[in-house]
Amino acid sequence: MKRRNFLKTSVALITPTIISGNPIHIFDNNHPILNPQVLANVNNDKVLVIIQLSGGNDGLNTVIPKSVYSNYYNARTNIAIPETSILKLNNFDATGLHPSMTGMQNLFNDGKLSIIQSVGYPEPNYSHFRATDIWMSASDSDQYLNTGWAGRYLDFNYPNYPDDYPNAQTPDPLAIQIGSITSLTCQGPVVNMGLSISNPSSTYNLLDGVDEFVPNTNGGYELNFIRTIAKQTNKYATRLKQVSDSITQQGTYPANNSLASQLKIVARLIKGGLGTKIYLVSTGGFDTHSNQVQAGDTIKGTHANLLSGLSEAIKSFQDDLKGLEVEDRVLGMTFSEFGRRVKSNASGGTDHGAAAPLFLFGKNLRGGVFGTNPNLPLNATVNDNIPYQYDFRSIYNSIIQNWFCVSETDALQVMYKQFPILPIINASACSVVGIETPASGKPGSMINCYPNPFKTSTQIEFKVNVGHTLLQLLNNSGTVIRVLVDGMFNYEGNNSYSLYDNSLAPGVYYIRMQHGIEQYIKSVIKL
Protein backbone atom coordinates (compact mmCIF):
# COMPACT_ATOMS: atom_id res chain seq x y z
CA MET A 1 0.00 0.00 0.00
CA LYS A 2 1.32 3.45 -0.89
CA ARG A 3 1.99 5.79 2.04
CA ARG A 4 -0.46 8.37 0.64
CA ASN A 5 -3.26 5.80 0.49
CA PHE A 6 -2.36 4.51 3.92
CA LEU A 7 -2.61 8.01 5.36
CA LYS A 8 -6.12 8.37 4.00
CA THR A 9 -7.32 5.48 6.13
CA SER A 10 -4.99 5.60 9.12
CA VAL A 11 -5.77 7.78 12.11
CA ALA A 12 -2.59 6.81 13.94
CA LEU A 13 -0.12 8.32 11.49
CA ILE A 14 -1.86 11.66 11.21
CA THR A 15 -2.66 11.96 14.89
CA PRO A 16 0.06 14.12 16.51
CA THR A 17 2.15 13.14 19.52
CA ILE A 18 1.31 15.13 22.64
CA ILE A 19 4.11 17.07 24.35
CA SER A 20 2.98 19.20 27.29
CA GLY A 21 -0.44 19.40 25.68
CA ASN A 22 0.92 20.30 22.25
CA PRO A 23 0.23 17.97 19.31
CA ILE A 24 3.29 17.89 17.03
CA HIS A 25 4.04 15.29 14.34
CA ILE A 26 6.92 12.81 14.58
CA PHE A 27 9.73 12.25 12.06
CA ASP A 28 12.69 9.92 11.77
CA ASN A 29 15.92 10.71 13.67
CA ASN A 30 17.91 10.92 10.42
CA HIS A 31 15.48 13.29 8.78
CA PRO A 32 17.03 16.28 6.95
CA ILE A 33 14.93 18.58 9.12
CA LEU A 34 17.83 18.45 11.63
CA ASN A 35 20.64 18.99 9.13
CA PRO A 36 22.62 22.12 10.19
CA GLN A 37 23.10 23.10 6.55
CA VAL A 38 19.33 23.07 6.10
CA LEU A 39 18.85 25.19 9.21
CA ALA A 40 21.10 27.87 7.71
CA ASN A 41 19.15 28.05 4.45
CA VAL A 42 15.54 28.38 5.52
CA ASN A 43 12.88 29.87 3.30
CA ASN A 44 12.31 33.53 4.17
CA ASP A 45 9.37 34.10 1.86
CA LYS A 46 6.07 35.87 2.64
CA VAL A 47 3.91 34.89 5.59
CA LEU A 48 0.16 35.18 6.21
CA VAL A 49 -1.19 35.36 9.77
CA ILE A 50 -4.93 34.66 10.12
CA ILE A 51 -6.81 35.68 13.27
CA GLN A 52 -10.19 34.05 13.81
CA LEU A 53 -12.71 35.99 15.92
CA SER A 54 -14.93 33.12 16.98
CA GLY A 55 -18.60 33.76 17.67
CA GLY A 56 -19.58 36.38 15.09
CA ASN A 57 -18.23 39.86 15.79
CA ASP A 58 -20.61 42.84 15.93
CA GLY A 59 -19.26 44.87 13.03
CA LEU A 60 -21.44 47.94 13.58
CA ASN A 61 -19.99 48.55 17.04
CA THR A 62 -16.49 47.78 15.79
CA VAL A 63 -16.33 49.98 12.68
CA ILE A 64 -18.93 52.65 13.31
CA PRO A 65 -20.69 54.42 10.40
CA LYS A 66 -20.43 58.05 11.52
CA SER A 67 -22.00 59.35 8.29
CA VAL A 68 -25.32 57.67 9.22
CA TYR A 69 -24.91 57.93 12.98
CA SER A 70 -28.55 58.87 13.66
CA ASN A 71 -29.81 55.71 11.95
CA TYR A 72 -27.14 53.68 13.73
CA TYR A 73 -28.16 55.12 17.11
CA ASN A 74 -31.88 54.64 16.50
CA ALA A 75 -31.30 50.98 15.68
CA ARG A 76 -29.39 50.20 18.88
CA THR A 77 -30.01 52.85 21.51
CA ASN A 78 -29.17 50.46 24.36
CA ILE A 79 -25.69 49.57 23.03
CA ALA A 80 -24.76 52.45 20.68
CA ILE A 81 -21.33 54.02 21.12
CA PRO A 82 -21.59 57.79 21.86
CA GLU A 83 -20.66 59.80 18.80
CA THR A 84 -18.10 61.83 20.73
CA SER A 85 -16.28 58.65 21.82
CA ILE A 86 -15.74 57.18 18.35
CA LEU A 87 -12.06 57.01 17.39
CA LYS A 88 -11.18 59.08 14.33
CA LEU A 89 -9.45 57.70 11.25
CA ASN A 90 -7.14 59.95 9.23
CA ASN A 91 -8.74 61.06 5.93
CA PHE A 92 -11.87 58.96 6.54
CA ASP A 93 -14.22 61.20 8.49
CA ALA A 94 -17.30 59.12 7.65
CA THR A 95 -16.05 56.09 9.58
CA GLY A 96 -14.55 55.47 13.03
CA LEU A 97 -13.49 52.73 15.43
CA HIS A 98 -14.74 51.56 18.82
CA PRO A 99 -13.06 53.64 21.55
CA SER A 100 -11.24 50.60 22.97
CA MET A 101 -9.29 50.10 19.72
CA THR A 102 -6.62 52.78 20.06
CA GLY A 103 -3.86 50.39 19.03
CA MET A 104 -5.52 49.59 15.72
CA GLN A 105 -6.40 53.26 15.27
CA ASN A 106 -2.68 54.05 15.44
CA LEU A 107 -1.91 51.32 12.91
CA PHE A 108 -4.58 52.67 10.56
CA ASN A 109 -3.24 56.21 10.80
CA ASP A 110 0.25 54.85 10.09
CA GLY A 111 -1.00 53.14 6.92
CA LYS A 112 -0.59 49.63 8.35
CA LEU A 113 -4.27 48.73 8.76
CA SER A 114 -7.01 48.40 6.15
CA ILE A 115 -10.74 48.13 6.80
CA ILE A 116 -12.84 46.32 4.22
CA GLN A 117 -16.50 47.14 4.68
CA SER A 118 -19.39 44.69 4.66
CA VAL A 119 -17.60 41.45 3.85
CA GLY A 120 -19.83 38.44 3.32
CA TYR A 121 -21.31 36.25 0.59
CA PRO A 122 -24.66 35.51 -1.08
CA GLU A 123 -27.25 33.55 0.93
CA PRO A 124 -25.46 33.88 4.29
CA ASN A 125 -25.74 31.10 6.84
CA TYR A 126 -26.32 32.00 10.50
CA SER A 127 -25.12 28.76 12.09
CA HIS A 128 -21.75 29.13 13.83
CA PHE A 129 -20.54 25.75 12.59
CA ARG A 130 -21.75 25.96 9.02
CA ALA A 131 -20.76 29.61 8.56
CA THR A 132 -17.27 28.84 9.89
CA ASP A 133 -16.94 25.97 7.41
CA ILE A 134 -17.97 28.29 4.57
CA TRP A 135 -15.30 30.83 5.50
CA MET A 136 -12.62 28.17 5.99
CA SER A 137 -13.37 26.23 2.82
CA ALA A 138 -14.30 29.27 0.66
CA SER A 139 -17.40 27.45 -0.54
CA ASP A 140 -20.77 28.73 -1.66
CA SER A 141 -23.40 28.64 1.07
CA ASP A 142 -25.03 25.57 -0.50
CA GLN A 143 -21.75 23.85 -1.36
CA TYR A 144 -19.89 21.45 0.93
CA LEU A 145 -16.12 21.19 0.50
CA ASN A 146 -13.85 18.93 2.53
CA THR A 147 -10.75 21.02 1.85
CA GLY A 148 -9.77 24.49 3.07
CA TRP A 149 -8.76 27.40 0.87
CA ALA A 150 -5.30 27.66 2.48
CA GLY A 151 -4.90 23.88 2.37
CA ARG A 152 -5.57 23.90 -1.37
CA TYR A 153 -3.06 26.70 -1.85
CA LEU A 154 -0.40 24.79 0.09
CA ASP A 155 -1.17 21.53 -1.68
CA PHE A 156 -0.87 23.26 -5.07
CA ASN A 157 2.52 24.76 -4.21
CA TYR A 158 3.88 21.79 -2.28
CA PRO A 159 2.76 18.79 -4.36
CA ASN A 160 2.61 15.21 -3.06
CA TYR A 161 2.55 16.29 0.60
CA PRO A 162 3.07 14.47 2.94
CA ASP A 163 5.22 12.14 0.79
CA ASP A 164 8.89 13.18 0.93
CA TYR A 165 8.26 16.03 3.39
CA PRO A 166 10.11 17.54 5.18
CA ASN A 167 13.00 17.77 2.72
CA ALA A 168 16.08 19.89 2.17
CA GLN A 169 14.09 22.59 0.38
CA THR A 170 11.09 22.51 2.75
CA PRO A 171 12.25 21.51 6.24
CA ASP A 172 9.51 23.32 8.17
CA PRO A 173 5.78 22.93 8.79
CA LEU A 174 3.80 24.44 5.93
CA ALA A 175 1.26 25.92 8.33
CA ILE A 176 0.97 26.22 12.10
CA GLN A 177 -2.17 26.76 14.12
CA ILE A 178 -1.82 27.83 17.75
CA GLY A 179 -4.55 27.59 20.34
CA SER A 180 -6.83 24.98 18.82
CA ILE A 181 -6.95 21.74 16.89
CA THR A 182 -5.98 22.01 13.24
CA SER A 183 -8.89 23.59 11.40
CA LEU A 184 -10.53 23.07 8.02
CA THR A 185 -8.71 26.17 6.73
CA CYS A 186 -5.51 24.18 6.11
CA GLN A 187 -7.12 20.86 5.18
CA GLY A 188 -5.59 19.52 1.98
CA PRO A 189 -6.89 16.81 -0.36
CA VAL A 190 -5.13 14.02 1.57
CA VAL A 191 -4.12 15.28 5.01
CA ASN A 192 -4.21 18.55 6.89
CA MET A 193 -1.32 20.74 5.76
CA GLY A 194 -1.01 22.38 9.18
CA LEU A 195 0.61 21.59 12.51
CA SER A 196 -1.42 22.19 15.67
CA ILE A 197 -0.10 23.57 18.93
CA SER A 198 -3.01 23.50 21.33
CA ASN A 199 -1.66 25.37 24.35
CA PRO A 200 0.39 28.59 23.99
CA SER A 201 1.69 28.42 27.58
CA SER A 202 2.99 24.91 27.04
CA THR A 203 4.56 26.05 23.79
CA TYR A 204 6.70 28.56 25.66
CA ASN A 205 7.80 25.74 27.96
CA LEU A 206 8.71 23.67 24.93
CA LEU A 207 10.60 26.50 23.22
CA ASP A 208 12.38 27.57 26.41
CA GLY A 209 13.24 24.03 27.47
CA VAL A 210 11.11 24.22 30.61
CA ASP A 211 9.37 21.09 31.87
CA GLU A 212 5.96 21.36 33.44
CA PHE A 213 5.67 20.16 37.03
CA VAL A 214 4.98 16.49 37.57
CA PRO A 215 4.04 14.98 40.96
CA ASN A 216 6.57 12.95 42.94
CA THR A 217 4.62 9.73 42.45
CA ASN A 218 4.88 6.59 40.36
CA GLY A 219 2.47 8.15 37.91
CA GLY A 220 4.53 11.32 37.85
CA TYR A 221 7.72 9.40 37.06
CA GLU A 222 5.95 7.64 34.22
CA LEU A 223 4.57 10.91 32.88
CA ASN A 224 8.02 12.49 32.98
CA PHE A 225 9.48 9.47 31.18
CA ILE A 226 6.83 9.66 28.44
CA ARG A 227 7.48 13.36 27.95
CA THR A 228 11.22 12.76 27.72
CA ILE A 229 10.86 10.02 25.11
CA ALA A 230 8.34 12.08 23.16
CA LYS A 231 10.67 15.08 23.06
CA GLN A 232 13.57 12.94 21.93
CA THR A 233 11.59 11.50 19.06
CA ASN A 234 9.71 14.60 18.03
CA LYS A 235 11.72 16.32 15.33
CA TYR A 236 9.36 19.16 14.67
CA ALA A 237 9.62 20.08 18.33
CA THR A 238 13.40 20.08 18.00
CA ARG A 239 13.20 22.19 14.88
CA LEU A 240 10.91 24.71 16.55
CA LYS A 241 13.23 24.91 19.54
CA GLN A 242 16.28 25.43 17.35
CA VAL A 243 14.54 28.24 15.53
CA SER A 244 13.26 29.80 18.72
CA ASP A 245 16.60 29.67 20.55
CA SER A 246 18.04 32.18 18.11
CA ILE A 247 15.64 34.86 19.44
CA THR A 248 16.72 36.31 22.76
CA GLN A 249 14.67 39.52 22.86
CA GLN A 250 11.18 40.53 21.74
CA GLY A 251 8.91 43.51 22.10
CA THR A 252 6.44 44.00 24.93
CA TYR A 253 3.08 42.24 24.78
CA PRO A 254 0.08 42.77 27.09
CA ALA A 255 -0.28 40.34 29.99
CA ASN A 256 -3.33 38.08 30.40
CA ASN A 257 -4.08 38.29 26.68
CA SER A 258 -4.32 34.87 25.03
CA LEU A 259 -4.26 36.26 21.52
CA ALA A 260 -1.16 38.31 22.28
CA SER A 261 0.55 35.18 23.66
CA GLN A 262 -0.20 33.33 20.44
CA LEU A 263 1.04 36.17 18.25
CA LYS A 264 4.22 36.47 20.29
CA ILE A 265 5.03 32.86 19.43
CA VAL A 266 4.34 33.57 15.76
CA ALA A 267 6.68 36.59 15.73
CA ARG A 268 9.38 34.56 17.45
CA LEU A 269 9.19 31.74 14.91
CA ILE A 270 9.12 34.08 11.93
CA LYS A 271 12.18 35.98 13.11
CA GLY A 272 13.94 32.71 13.91
CA GLY A 273 13.76 31.80 10.24
CA LEU A 274 11.00 29.20 10.22
CA GLY A 275 9.79 28.83 6.64
CA THR A 276 6.14 28.31 7.58
CA LYS A 277 3.82 30.13 5.17
CA ILE A 278 0.59 30.40 7.13
CA TYR A 279 -0.12 30.85 10.84
CA LEU A 280 -3.59 30.60 12.35
CA VAL A 281 -4.48 31.97 15.77
CA SER A 282 -7.84 32.53 17.39
CA THR A 283 -9.73 34.34 20.11
CA GLY A 284 -13.34 33.72 21.15
CA GLY A 285 -16.28 35.21 23.01
CA PHE A 286 -17.79 37.29 20.19
CA ASP A 287 -21.24 35.65 20.35
CA THR A 288 -22.68 38.64 22.24
CA HIS A 289 -26.41 37.90 22.45
CA SER A 290 -26.73 39.67 25.80
CA ASN A 291 -24.88 42.09 28.06
CA GLN A 292 -22.68 43.21 25.21
CA VAL A 293 -22.09 46.54 26.95
CA GLN A 294 -21.93 47.68 30.56
CA ALA A 295 -25.16 49.07 31.88
CA GLY A 296 -25.00 52.85 31.90
CA ASP A 297 -21.76 53.04 29.91
CA THR A 298 -21.84 51.54 26.42
CA ILE A 299 -18.14 52.06 25.73
CA LYS A 300 -17.37 49.45 28.40
CA GLY A 301 -18.37 45.83 28.81
CA THR A 302 -17.84 42.45 27.17
CA HIS A 303 -17.49 43.63 23.59
CA ALA A 304 -15.21 46.49 24.58
CA ASN A 305 -12.93 44.05 26.40
CA LEU A 306 -12.83 41.74 23.38
CA LEU A 307 -11.97 44.57 20.99
CA SER A 308 -9.39 45.99 23.38
CA GLY A 309 -7.67 42.61 23.59
CA LEU A 310 -7.72 42.27 19.81
CA SER A 311 -6.40 45.77 19.24
CA GLU A 312 -3.62 45.54 21.82
CA ALA A 313 -2.50 42.14 20.54
CA ILE A 314 -2.31 43.20 16.89
CA LYS A 315 -0.54 46.49 17.71
CA SER A 316 2.03 44.71 19.91
CA PHE A 317 2.57 42.06 17.24
CA GLN A 318 3.08 44.63 14.48
CA ASP A 319 5.47 46.64 16.65
CA ASP A 320 7.39 43.47 17.48
CA LEU A 321 7.69 42.54 13.80
CA LYS A 322 9.11 45.99 13.11
CA GLY A 323 11.61 45.72 15.95
CA LEU A 324 12.60 42.24 14.75
CA GLU A 325 13.01 43.65 11.21
CA VAL A 326 10.64 41.15 9.58
CA GLU A 327 7.50 43.23 9.05
CA ASP A 328 8.14 43.36 5.28
CA ARG A 329 7.38 39.64 5.12
CA VAL A 330 4.15 39.51 7.11
CA LEU A 331 0.51 40.18 6.21
CA GLY A 332 -2.27 39.72 8.78
CA MET A 333 -6.01 39.22 8.39
CA THR A 334 -8.95 38.88 10.79
CA PHE A 335 -12.19 37.06 10.09
CA SER A 336 -15.36 36.13 11.96
CA GLU A 337 -17.97 33.66 10.75
CA PHE A 338 -20.63 36.36 10.45
CA GLY A 339 -21.64 39.79 11.74
CA ARG A 340 -24.65 40.80 13.82
CA ARG A 341 -28.08 42.30 13.09
CA VAL A 342 -28.57 46.03 12.58
CA LYS A 343 -31.01 46.32 15.49
CA SER A 344 -29.91 45.35 18.98
CA ASN A 345 -32.07 43.07 21.10
CA ALA A 346 -33.76 43.71 24.42
CA SER A 347 -31.02 41.84 26.30
CA GLY A 348 -28.44 44.47 25.53
CA GLY A 349 -26.85 42.38 22.80
CA THR A 350 -27.01 41.54 19.12
CA ASP A 351 -28.16 38.48 17.22
CA HIS A 352 -26.56 36.55 14.36
CA GLY A 353 -26.29 38.62 11.20
CA ALA A 354 -24.72 38.72 7.77
CA ALA A 355 -21.89 40.96 6.52
CA ALA A 356 -19.30 42.65 8.73
CA PRO A 357 -16.02 44.56 8.33
CA LEU A 358 -12.74 42.68 7.96
CA PHE A 359 -9.29 43.93 8.99
CA LEU A 360 -5.98 43.51 7.19
CA PHE A 361 -2.74 44.63 8.79
CA GLY A 362 0.88 44.89 7.72
CA LYS A 363 3.50 47.18 6.25
CA ASN A 364 2.75 46.31 2.61
CA LEU A 365 -0.93 47.27 2.63
CA ARG A 366 -2.40 50.19 0.74
CA GLY A 367 -4.24 51.20 3.90
CA GLY A 368 -7.56 53.00 4.23
CA VAL A 369 -11.22 52.05 4.17
CA PHE A 370 -12.44 50.00 1.22
CA GLY A 371 -16.12 50.29 0.43
CA THR A 372 -18.76 52.54 1.91
CA ASN A 373 -20.61 52.61 5.21
CA PRO A 374 -23.59 50.24 5.33
CA ASN A 375 -26.94 51.65 4.31
CA LEU A 376 -28.90 51.54 7.57
CA PRO A 377 -32.69 51.86 7.52
CA LEU A 378 -34.26 54.79 9.36
CA ASN A 379 -36.42 52.46 11.44
CA ALA A 380 -34.60 49.14 11.63
CA THR A 381 -36.43 45.93 12.54
CA VAL A 382 -35.07 42.77 14.15
CA ASN A 383 -34.88 41.18 10.69
CA ASP A 384 -32.73 43.87 9.09
CA ASN A 385 -29.24 42.87 8.10
CA ILE A 386 -26.21 44.39 6.44
CA PRO A 387 -25.87 43.31 2.80
CA TYR A 388 -22.42 42.33 1.65
CA GLN A 389 -20.35 44.64 -0.53
CA TYR A 390 -17.29 42.41 -0.88
CA ASP A 391 -17.26 38.64 -1.20
CA PHE A 392 -14.76 37.26 1.34
CA ARG A 393 -13.33 35.06 -1.40
CA SER A 394 -12.21 38.17 -3.28
CA ILE A 395 -9.97 38.90 -0.31
CA TYR A 396 -8.59 35.35 -0.33
CA ASN A 397 -8.00 35.56 -4.08
CA SER A 398 -6.26 38.93 -3.70
CA ILE A 399 -3.94 37.49 -1.05
CA ILE A 400 -3.15 34.42 -3.13
CA GLN A 401 -2.34 36.44 -6.26
CA ASN A 402 -0.93 39.71 -4.92
CA TRP A 403 0.78 38.49 -1.75
CA PHE A 404 1.80 34.92 -2.49
CA CYS A 405 2.26 35.87 -6.16
CA VAL A 406 0.28 32.98 -7.65
CA SER A 407 -0.83 33.48 -11.25
CA GLU A 408 -4.48 34.06 -12.07
CA THR A 409 -4.68 30.69 -13.82
CA ASP A 410 -3.17 28.82 -10.90
CA ALA A 411 -5.28 30.74 -8.37
CA LEU A 412 -8.38 29.45 -10.14
CA GLN A 413 -7.33 25.91 -9.19
CA VAL A 414 -7.27 26.98 -5.55
CA MET A 415 -10.44 29.09 -5.45
CA TYR A 416 -12.43 27.04 -8.01
CA LYS A 417 -14.07 30.24 -9.29
CA GLN A 418 -12.95 33.66 -10.45
CA PHE A 419 -13.32 36.41 -7.87
CA PRO A 420 -12.36 40.07 -8.38
CA ILE A 421 -8.94 41.15 -7.19
CA LEU A 422 -9.06 43.99 -4.66
CA PRO A 423 -6.29 46.63 -4.53
CA ILE A 424 -5.43 45.92 -0.91
CA ILE A 425 -1.71 45.09 -1.24
CA ASN A 426 1.09 47.29 -2.53
CA ALA A 427 2.02 46.42 -6.09
CA SER A 428 5.67 46.01 -5.14
CA ALA A 429 4.83 42.88 -3.11
CA CYS A 430 4.91 40.83 -6.31
CA SER A 431 6.82 43.36 -8.44
CA VAL A 432 3.86 43.93 -10.72
CA VAL A 433 2.18 47.04 -12.04
CA GLY A 434 -0.07 48.51 -9.38
CA ILE A 435 -3.84 48.46 -9.40
CA GLU A 436 -5.40 51.85 -8.91
CA THR A 437 -7.34 52.32 -5.71
CA PRO A 438 -11.05 52.31 -6.55
CA ALA A 439 -12.97 55.55 -6.37
CA SER A 440 -14.43 55.83 -2.90
CA GLY A 441 -17.63 57.51 -4.05
CA LYS A 442 -20.63 58.27 -1.90
CA PRO A 443 -23.15 55.55 -1.08
CA GLY A 444 -25.32 54.99 -4.12
CA SER A 445 -23.32 57.38 -6.33
CA MET A 446 -23.18 54.79 -9.12
CA ILE A 447 -26.78 53.61 -8.65
CA ASN A 448 -30.06 55.55 -8.53
CA CYS A 449 -33.59 54.28 -8.18
CA TYR A 450 -36.82 56.17 -8.85
CA PRO A 451 -39.36 56.21 -7.49
CA ASN A 452 -37.92 55.26 -4.13
CA PRO A 453 -39.93 54.21 -2.13
CA PHE A 454 -42.03 52.45 -4.79
CA LYS A 455 -45.28 50.52 -4.86
CA THR A 456 -45.21 48.36 -7.98
CA SER A 457 -42.04 49.20 -9.92
CA THR A 458 -38.85 51.23 -9.81
CA GLN A 459 -36.32 52.20 -12.46
CA ILE A 460 -32.73 51.36 -11.58
CA GLU A 461 -30.13 53.52 -13.30
CA PHE A 462 -26.49 52.51 -13.02
CA LYS A 463 -23.22 53.60 -14.58
CA VAL A 464 -21.07 51.04 -16.34
CA ASN A 465 -17.58 50.93 -17.76
CA VAL A 466 -16.24 48.52 -20.34
CA GLY A 467 -16.17 45.06 -18.76
CA HIS A 468 -18.30 42.78 -16.64
CA THR A 469 -21.12 44.17 -14.48
CA LEU A 470 -23.23 42.28 -11.94
CA LEU A 471 -26.46 43.76 -10.55
CA GLN A 472 -28.25 41.88 -7.75
CA LEU A 473 -31.35 42.34 -5.63
CA LEU A 474 -30.86 41.45 -1.94
CA ASN A 475 -33.42 41.27 0.84
CA ASN A 476 -32.90 42.82 4.27
CA SER A 477 -31.12 39.69 5.55
CA GLY A 478 -28.40 40.07 2.94
CA THR A 479 -29.59 37.16 0.78
CA VAL A 480 -29.44 37.50 -3.00
CA ILE A 481 -32.99 36.90 -4.21
CA ARG A 482 -32.50 37.83 -7.85
CA VAL A 483 -29.72 38.51 -10.33
CA LEU A 484 -30.86 41.51 -12.40
CA VAL A 485 -27.87 41.98 -14.70
CA ASP A 486 -24.90 39.69 -15.28
CA GLY A 487 -22.98 40.43 -18.44
CA MET A 488 -20.24 42.21 -20.37
CA PHE A 489 -20.53 45.82 -21.52
CA ASN A 490 -18.46 47.11 -24.44
CA TYR A 491 -19.19 50.77 -23.75
CA GLU A 492 -18.94 53.29 -20.93
CA GLY A 493 -22.03 55.17 -19.81
CA ASN A 494 -25.46 54.93 -18.20
CA ASN A 495 -27.75 51.92 -18.27
CA SER A 496 -31.07 51.05 -16.69
CA TYR A 497 -33.15 48.15 -15.46
CA SER A 498 -36.89 48.15 -14.71
CA LEU A 499 -37.70 46.29 -11.53
CA TYR A 500 -41.34 45.26 -11.55
CA ASP A 501 -42.54 42.60 -9.16
CA ASN A 502 -45.85 42.53 -7.31
CA SER A 503 -44.70 39.45 -5.39
CA LEU A 504 -42.10 41.41 -3.41
CA ALA A 505 -43.24 41.88 0.16
CA PRO A 506 -43.13 45.41 1.58
CA GLY A 507 -39.82 46.24 3.21
CA VAL A 508 -36.24 47.32 2.66
CA TYR A 509 -34.22 45.81 -0.20
CA TYR A 510 -30.74 46.46 -1.53
CA ILE A 511 -29.43 46.82 -5.04
CA ARG A 512 -25.83 45.59 -5.18
CA MET A 513 -23.65 46.43 -8.17
CA GLN A 514 -20.24 44.90 -8.79
CA HIS A 515 -18.11 46.20 -11.63
CA GLY A 516 -14.62 44.76 -11.64
CA ILE A 517 -13.09 45.51 -8.25
CA GLU A 518 -15.68 48.11 -7.27
CA GLN A 519 -18.82 47.38 -5.27
CA TYR A 520 -21.79 49.66 -4.68
CA ILE A 521 -24.93 49.29 -2.56
CA LYS A 522 -28.20 51.22 -2.81
CA SER A 523 -31.18 50.73 -0.52
CA VAL A 524 -34.68 50.75 -1.95
CA ILE A 525 -38.02 50.52 -0.15
CA LYS A 526 -41.08 48.60 -1.36
CA LEU A 527 -44.29 50.06 0.08
Image (tube, rainbow, N blue to C red):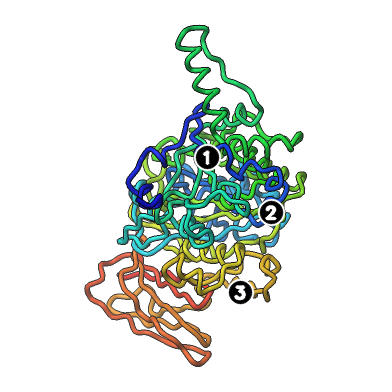
| Residue 172 percent coordinates (x, y) | 59, 47
Badge nearest the viewer, 2 or 3: 2
The residue pinned by badge 3 equals 439
In the rendered structure, which amino acid carries the disc numbered 2?
A: Asn
Which residue sits furthest bottom?
Answer: 491
Distance of label 3 from label 1 (alpha carbons): 52 Å
- Residue 44 has which mark? 2
- Of the residues shown, which amino acid type is indicated by label 3? Ala
Residue appearing at x 48%, y 88% in the figure:
494
Residue 359 is left or right of residue 162, and the answer is right
Q: Earlier in the sequence, mark 2 or mark 1?
A: 1
Disc 2, disc 1: CB below 8 Å? no
SS at badge 1: loop
User: Which residue is at the front of the view, 417 or 335?
Assistant: 417
SS for callout 2:
loop
Q: Position of residue 160 (x, y in %)?
A: 47, 57
Q: Earlier in the sequence, mark 3 or mark 1?
A: 1
Amino acid under label 1? Answer: Phe
